[in-house]
């Protein structure tokens, strides 16, 4: 009656910080994320203030600052995502409202012509 499910391979390990940074460095300049970041400062939480020299990139303070920046950007993204969802819902309800208004106007026009 029930068939045995095929074995699913284990999930790959998440990338470490150095791999993430390498991916960011190797991403093209026209990547959507970079375009968004150029157009808004919401995603950049005082990165200039916490910037560290390349020589100190493995120091505990530099790693700590990178983690703090990452967490701040992540919080900002979550906030922006929530705002976007709210705005999407407003747009969808407005669309329904406008369609209903258009239907009513058409009905009134047809009644006026008769």
Image (cartoon, helix red, strand yellow):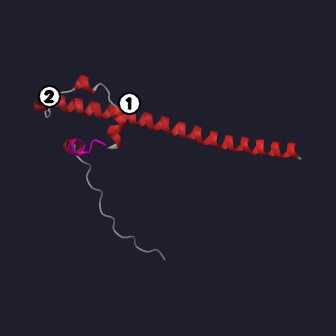
Query: Residue at horizontal 23%, vertical 25%?
Result: 50
Describe the element under mark 2 as helix, strand or loop: loop
Q: In this view, does 44 lie above or below 30?
A: above
Q: CA separation, marks 2 and 1?
A: 25 Å
| Residue at 12% over, 30% down | 56
- Does residue 58 belong to the magenta stretch? no
Q: Picture coordinates of residue 66 (x, y %)?
A: 23, 32
User: Does 84 appear above or below 110?
Assistant: above
Element type at marker 1?
loop
Q: Which of 73 and 34 is in front in this view?
A: 34
Circle 2 residue? 53
Q: Magenta residues, as a range?
A: 22-30
Q: Where is residue 107 in the image (x, y as percent from the top left)?
A: 80, 45
- Pointer 1 residue: 40
- Residue most extreme to the left: 55
Residue at 86% in and 45% down:
113
Which residue shows up at 14% across the image and 33% down it? 57
């Amino acid at each position: 009656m029930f068939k045995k499910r095929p074995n699913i391979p284990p999930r790959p390990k998440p990338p470490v910080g150095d791999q993430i940074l390498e991916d960011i460095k190797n991403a093209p300049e026209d990547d959507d994320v970079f375009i968004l970041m150029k157009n808004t400062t919401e995603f950049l939480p005082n990165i200039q203030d916490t910037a560290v020299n390349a020589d100190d990139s493995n120091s505990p303070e530099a790693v700590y600052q990178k983690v703090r920046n990452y967490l701040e950007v992540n919080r900002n993204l979550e906030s922006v995502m929530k705002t976007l969802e709210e705005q999407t819902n407003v747009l969808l309800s407005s669309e329904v409202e406008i369609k209903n208004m258009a239907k009513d106007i058409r009905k009134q026009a047809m009644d006026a012509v008769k």
